[in-house]
């Protein structure tokens, strides 16, 4: 499942749909056998990683509230693009699954952890996703939308993915 963020002038919408007032933070990623995310909370991770960067507190996404949280700085003027950052912790899905455009995806690693970076995963400028392996059958996704600046989005996704990798269980 590929998740997207919509960055608009209104910080209370996701993909054009209103964000419920007072949306609550999920307790943690669902637990199960060998769930490497059992003790982690994706909203807390977003907040820790983005602390001091001007982002509001992370909120669960409407599309995947049990596994995904995001924080968005809305566009502040015609000259300043907003930026949205989301983290999704997905047990039971490999980082190599659901690659929308293998022709533009790039393999790599962060501190030895295998990753796939997808610039413009939906063929829309300004988006970037980094999928990271977490054990044999789980992945962490970092998704960033930054106006129409794909290079900025990928730089931010790499920065967030590096910080996230240090907080995840080792492979």
Image (cartoon, helix red, strand yellow):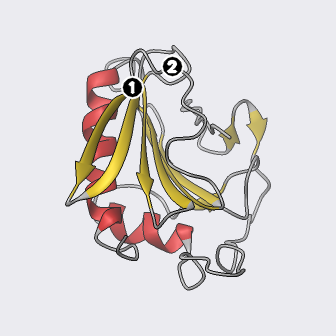
Q: CA distance from mark 1 to mark 2?
A: 6 Å
Q: Residue furthest front?
A: 136
> Which x, y percent locates residue 145?
45, 33
Does residue 157 appear in this view? yes
Q: Quadrant of residue 164?
A: bottom left
Q: Is residue 51 visible?
A: no
Q: Quadrant of the N terminus?
A: top right
Horizontally, is 142 left or right of 79 in the view?
right
Q: Is residue 46 above or below residue 170?
A: above
Question: How many numbered dots are placed on residues in this image?
Answer: 2
Please give the residue where the numbered disc 2 appears in the rendered image: 101
Q: Which residue is mark 1?
A: 105
Q: Which mark is residue 25?
A: none
The answer to whether 118 appears left or right of 112 in the picture is right
Q: Is residue 66 above or below residue 36?
A: above
Quadrant in which the C terminus appears:
bottom left
Which one is nearer the viewer's eye here, 128 or 148?
A: 128
Q: Are marks 1 and 2 in contact (CB under 8 Å)?
A: yes
Observer-nearest residue: 90 or 52? 90
Which residue is pictured at 31% across the width and 19% down the height?
79
Q: Secondary structure at mark 1?
A: loop
- At a point 47% along the width and 59% down the height, the residue shown is 56
For residue 152, what is the image quadrant? top left
Depth check: 24 or 97 in front?
A: 97
Above or below for 104 versus 50: above
Other-residue count near label 1 (Cα within 10 Å), few / some / many at <14 / 14–19 / ≥20? some
SS for dot 2: loop
**Residue 2 % position (x, y):** 63, 37
Residue at point 58% right, 36% down? 5
**Front residue of this view, candidates 48 and 101:** 101
């Amino acid at each position: 499942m590929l998740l997207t963020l919509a960055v608009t002038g209104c910080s209370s919408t996701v993909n054009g749909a209103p964000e419920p007032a007072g949306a609550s933070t999920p307790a943690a990623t669902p637990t199960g056998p060998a769930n490497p995310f059992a003790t982690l909370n994706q909203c807390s991770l977003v907040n820790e990683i983005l602390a001091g960067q001007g982002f509001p507190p992370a909120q669960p996404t409407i599309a995947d509230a049990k596994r995904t949280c995001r924080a968005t700085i809305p566009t502040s003027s015609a000259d300043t693009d907003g930026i949205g950052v989301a983290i999704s912790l997905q047990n039971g899905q490999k980082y190599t699954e659901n690659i929308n455009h293998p022709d533009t995806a790039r393999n790599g690693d962060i501190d030895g952890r295998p990753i796939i970076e997808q610039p413009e995963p939906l063929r829309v400028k300004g988006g970037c996703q980094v999928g990271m392996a977490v054990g044999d059958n789980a992945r962490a996704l970092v998704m960033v939308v930054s106006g129409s600046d794909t290079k900025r989005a990928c730089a931010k996704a790499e920065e967030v993915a590096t910080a996230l990798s240090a907080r995840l269980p080792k492979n």
